Image (spheres, helix red, strand yellow):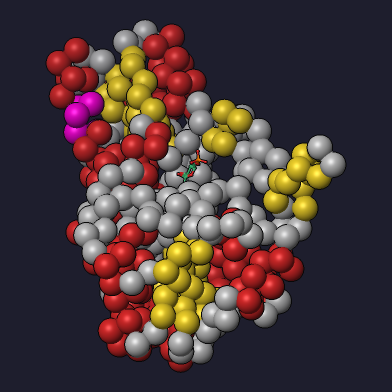
Amino acid sequence: MKRLGILTGGGDAPGLNAVIRAAVKTAIYEYGCEVIGIRDGYDGLMEKGGIIPLGIEDVRGILPRGGTILGAANRGNPYARKVIRDGKEVTIDVSEEIIQAIKQLDLDALLVLGGDGTLRSAHELYLKGAPIIGVPKTIDNDIGGTEVTFGFDTAVTTATEAIDKLHTTAEAHHRVMVLEVMGRNAGFIALHAGVSGGSDVILIPEIPFKYNSVIAKVRQRVERGYLFSIVVVSEGAKPLSGEQVFSREGDEVYVPRLGGIGQIVGEYIEKSGFETRVTVLGHVQRGGTPTPFDRWLATRYGAAAVRLAAQGKFDRMVSLQAGTIVDVSLEETIAVPKRVDINDDPVITARGMGISFGDE
Ligand code: F6P
């Protein structure tokens, strides 16, 4: 292996820099390999100045830094790229150009750090001849084939800290505090942070909820003398008799943007006679320094991805299973996105603790 490329696709997640650092160090120290970085996801393969050399000096000091030194772009779908042609904005397939750019760079392997969309494109690019290896990145933890994605632990930590803070003010003012967290169609952030923060109600996409059930839980607490409640709502949660709430529609390039269900739940609780405030945590969950767990996981993923590259094991993704780093087929990984198993221990444990999922 002589030349290795690294690309960070989709939205950012804490730990991207830790993966880049580990991959660069492993590639250079273990394999004497040259490493190049591709800026702004797949965009860097098509734009001037999109390729940068990555040496040891370039990754010095980046381990605790959030974001990505390579930049991120979640409009970078090679099969649907918006460009201006004859003065008009059109969406075109640029996958062939990307394949050509990868060939021209003479890469022996390309590490693609990404979530479901980026990994799907990566697999398709592999089928067209690109030597791809995937690394599972997302705060949502919704990628199949791995127990954990890097970035998730940091997002859960941030959300849990927010719940802890909301707790004290909720208790002081005898209020209901609703916290909307990210996660897309997977409720992992809400579930993990909700349990870790001692919430009373957790609403997740996997368990459609009833407004009356949420109110019943808040009322029951008041009747028992607990005059405040904490309600954690995943952005993808939806009522049994309704739909998910979006703050922006999607198109061929952008996926629809979830958001707003927390406000609706809050208004419902308030109308039922309980003073309520709503907090939307938003991109705070994606920012900041990665937790030690995410740094540890990202470092192991980055190094393992380089070892896979050296073995020529393409179309694979590094993954964590039972504490061990293994590799899985990219195709199988993207086939089934991961969701909260509502019959598994975490949900059973939460229910046993008296937490309501708004469905009973
Ligand atoms: O997939 C990560 C994520 O942060 C989701 O939890 C969220 O729905 C989405 O990205 C937000 O995307 P954007 O940064 O484009 O607003």
253 vs 162, nearest the viewer: 253
For residue 189, above or below residue 316:
above
Residue beneath the point at 69% across and 73% down: 100
For residue 199, above or below residue 108:
above
Q: Position of residue 325 (x, y in %)?
A: 34, 78
Does the segment drawn in magenta span residue 164?
yes
Residue 220 in view here: no
What secondary structure is the stretch in magenta mostly built from?
helix
From the viewer's perspective, tell me whether residue 111 is left or right of residue 57.
right
Residue beneath the point at 39% across and 37% down: 283
Residue beneath the point at 54% across and 35% down: 258
Q: Position of residue 55 (x, y in %)?
A: 33, 72
Q: Position of residue 148 (x, y in %)?
A: 37, 63
From the viewer's perspective, tell me whether residue 278 is left or right of residue 11.
left
**What segment is highlighted magenta in the picture?**
163-167
Number of numbered discs on residues:
0
Residue beneath the point at 36% across and 32% down: 281
321 vs 67, nearest the viewer: 67
Residue 58 in view here: yes
Report which quarter residue 59 is drawn in: bottom left
256 vs 307, nearest the viewer: 307
Q: Quadrant of the C terminus?
A: top left
From the viewer's perspective, tell me whether residue 178 is left or right of residue 45.
left
The residue furthest right is 86
Report which quarter residue 32 is drawn in: bottom left
